[in-house]
Image (cartoon, rainbow, N blue to C red):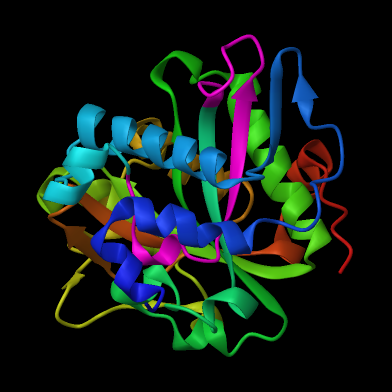
Amino acid sequence: MSWFDNLIDPKGVTEFLSQFMPVMPLQGELRIGNLEVRLAQNVAEVEAAQRLRYRVFYEEMAAKATDEQAESKLDVDLFDVGCDHVLVLDHNREEGDQVIGTYRMLRRSVAEKHAGFYTATEYNISKLLEHPGELLEVGRSCVDFNYRTRPTLELLWRGIASYVDQFDIQLIFGCASFPTVNPAEIQEELAYLYYHHLAPPALCAAALPERAVKMNVIGPQDINPRKVLTKLPPLIKGYLRVGAFVGEGAVIDEQWGSTDVCIVVKTDLITNKYAKHFGLTGEK
C-alpha cells in the first residue's frame, strides 16, 4: 500500500505519519507557566492536533468536511505526511487533552519527497522555489477558543522561531485566510495588502490563473490604512509585523469558506524588534 492509499482512511494517515516523527526537540525558552510549546512526538499527538484543527475549522468556522473527516472528527490531508507539528500544550489538562494550539510545518527537503506544498494548489510558487536554501511552508494554524491569549500566541511564535533557527530556514511562506468567500466584503483589505505589502518580483507567488481574484479593485486613494489594520485577521496582521509580503492575487476556497492570500517572509528581513522578542538571531 502506498502512502497515498492511506488517505482513504484518516486513521491510516496518522499511522503512516509515525515514521516521520521529529528527531530533535525545539530549543529555547518554550514554557510560560502551565503552557509549553514543542513538536509532536508521536502519532497520538499528531491526532490531537488534527482533532483540534477539526474543531476550529469545521465546527467553529465554515470549512466543509468530507464524510471521512466528519466521521473521524480529524482534519487530515495528504500534506500532513512528513510535516512537523508545533504544539502548545496545557499541562493542567488531562493527558490526551492537552493540545490547545498547533501549527503545521513543511520543509522543502521533505515536501520534495512527498506531495509537494499545499500553497501550490492555489499559487504558482516557482519564484519561491528558485530561492536558495531551506524553505518552510507554514499552515493549519489554530488555537482552542478558550486559549486565544497573548501567552499562547507568543509560544507559537517562539516555537516557529526555534524551528527556523534549528533548520536554517531562509524563507517562510503559506496561505492565510479571510473568513469570507465574497471578495467584495474585503476589497479594502485586499487592496491595502496589494499596495503596501506586495512581494518584490523575485519573491512574488501568483494566484493560479483559473483561481485568481484581483486584489487592486480599488485605488490607493480609496484606502484608509489605519481603519484597514483594525479589520485584518490577527494572523495576517502578525505576519505583517514581522515584515511579511503577500503574493499577487487572492484565491477563493469554497471548501474552507475563505479567501486566501499568499504570505511570504524572508527570515533575514524580520525586523530586529521581533527577531529579538521571539528568539530569532537574525544571523544566517
Judge from the rendering whether residue 257 lies leftward or rightward of residue 154; answer left or right.
left
* Rendering coords of residue 158 (x, y %): 73, 39
Question: Which sits in the foreground, 148 or 98?
Answer: 98
Numbered-mark total: 0
From the viewer's side, name the closer residue of 13 and 126. Answer: 13
Q: For this rendering, which residue is in front, 273 or 28?
A: 28
Picture coordinates of residue 190 (x, y %)?
Answer: 29, 54
Say whether residue 173 is left or right of residue 67.
right
| Residue 23 in which image quadrant | bottom right
Measured along the vertical axis of the image, is residue 39 above or below residue 108? above
In this rendering, the answer to whether 234 lies above or below 138 is above
Where does the magenta region start and end?
A: 75-99
The residue sitting at the front extreme is 1
Is residue 212 among what the camera can see?
A: yes
Residue 155 x %, y %: 68, 31
For residue 238, above or below residue 267: above
> In the image, what residue occupies the spot 67% across and 45% down?
41
The structure residue drawn at horizontal position 55% and vertical position 85%, both measured from the top left corner, is 129
Seen as rendered, the residue at the extreme top is: 92
Name the side, left or right, on which 35 lies relative to 6. Answer: right
